[in-house]
Image (tube, rainbow, N blue to C red):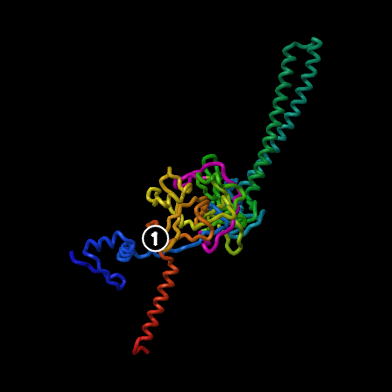
Amino acid sequence: MGKGAFIVGGLVLAVGGLAGAGYLLTQTPMGEKLRQNLKPKTPSVSVRLEPVRRSGLTRSISAPGLVEPRTKVEISAQVSARITALPFDEGERVQAGDVVVRLDAEDLTARLEAAKAGLRAQEARLRGSEADLAVAQSDFGRKKELYDSGDIAKMEFEQAENRYNQAVSAMEMARADVEIARAQIIEAERDLAHAVIASPIDGILTTLNAEEGELVVVGTLNTPGSIILEVADLSDMLLMARVDESNIAQVKAAQEATVHVNAYRDRPFPGVVERVGLERKQWTDGTYYYEAEIKLEEDPERPLLSGLSATAEIAVQRLDDVLLAPSQAVLDRRIDELPKDVLDRAGALIDQRKTFASVVYRVENGKAVATPVSIGPSDLADTVILGGLEEAQEVITGPFKALVDLKHDQAVIDEKVQQAEEAAAEARKKGEQETEPGSD
């Protein structure tokens, strides 16, 4: 075999034959270095880095719902009659005691007068019954004395006794009829009073379902009555939040909430949980939930209307002075795909009985290093780190596309460093162009 020559870094190295060249490239330290220099380099992946920090964390659960006033009154008629007046329009403010509906009272007044006349007739009948009873009682007394002395037959005495008993019964019936007539007057007076309907609360007339001249009807057991209007106190609003049954055990009264109302996307409303329902309910989409009432803080510049859609973030757990890493940095990796040296360093941080382990990626010597971690509660932004990291250590947080396929020992570069290098190169290029002969 002839001799071979290799040029490395500007130097010519002569070795004996091809066999000697293979030995140099594979069996010596210099050969390994040469092999690494000759091996094509994989471009570094640009990544973002953020430090692990110590702070507090609030864990919350999300619950959608509808905004409703705490106090809402549906006003319907207690008597069937035609509406003669609706003094307020929808959206107007009313005070407790203000008349909001007037009904036609002509028939109701006539009914009251008839009831009064009926009472007078029953009272006259009662007086007649009392007189009849007095006569029958007197006759019965005399007949008893005569019967006791043997002056009249037993039959005559019994006839007097029967007339007396009948008179007692007649008087009792007359008294009952008088009480019925008096009750009818009370009922007629109440019906007449119901012809004028006043608001029971201070509030806003939020719904007006009727017009003057319409006939309103009274509800029955199976048929709802006519709801004429609705008055609500819009200064005291609640979010009726639908809490998933898997989260309801964590929700308690007095917990703070942040409520995002769809109508006001600029900033949320503070809220406090006031009551947690005990009965499971079913929503229109078939899902089950428990209702939590959240008191919303009033904001005069952002009035809340009944029925607005909103979502509450209820703070169910608060942790102070804990180690936090960005949640997007914490990844699940199959344990059997992690390198042996990573598993050896992890120790108790990895449960070998499980399929996946939680890891973050740090950067050492320009390469991504898979670092198993033990994690605690998390929110949308941060995750509590219980072990595996120390404060101020930097972890890779993105971009998402890079994190999905990121591997241990993969070449990476901090995007800030890359941007600085690109800016410096651009500046050098611009400077060289300006110094070229003939450039102005």
In the rendered image, residue 258, in percent from the top left (x then y), is placed at 56, 56
> Where on the picture, by quarter, is residue 210?
bottom right
Q: Nearer the viewer, residue 310 or 193?
A: 310
In the depicted structure, whether residue 369 falls above or below residue 421 = above
The residue at the point 31 percent across, 63 percent down is 31
The number of numbered badges drawn on the structure is 1
In the rendered structure, which amino acid carries the disc numbered 1?
Answer: Ala
User: Disc 1 designates what residue?
Assistant: 402
The answer to whether residue 229 shows anywhere in this view is no
Helix, strand or loop at label 1? It is helix
Residue 19 falls left or right of residue 166: left
> Where on the picture, by quarter, is residue 299?
bottom right
In the depicted structure, whether residue 175 falls above or below residue 156 = below
The crowd level at tag 1 (other Cα within 10 Å; few <14, some 14-19, many 20+) is: some
Q: Nearer the viewer, residue 324 or 381?
A: 324
In the rendered image, residue 194, in percent from the top left (x then y), is placed at 63, 48
> Where on the picture, by quarter, is residue 370?
bottom left
- Does the magenta run of residues contain 164? no
The answer to whether residue 386 shows anywhere in this view is yes
Q: Nearer the viewer, residue 339 or 35?
A: 35
The residue at the point 75 percent across, 25 percent down is 133
The N terminus is located in which quarter?
A: bottom left
Residue at the far left in the pictured view: 1
The residue at the point 59 percent across, 57 percent down is 270
Q: Nearer the viewer, residue 41 or 146?
A: 41
Residue at the far front in the pictured view: 16
Which stretch is magenta? 262-289
In the rendered image, residue 350, in percent from the top left (x then y), is placed at 45, 47
In the rendered image, residue 69, in percent from the top left (x then y), is placed at 59, 53
Residue 250 falls left or right of residue 134: left
The C terminus is located in which quarter?
A: bottom left
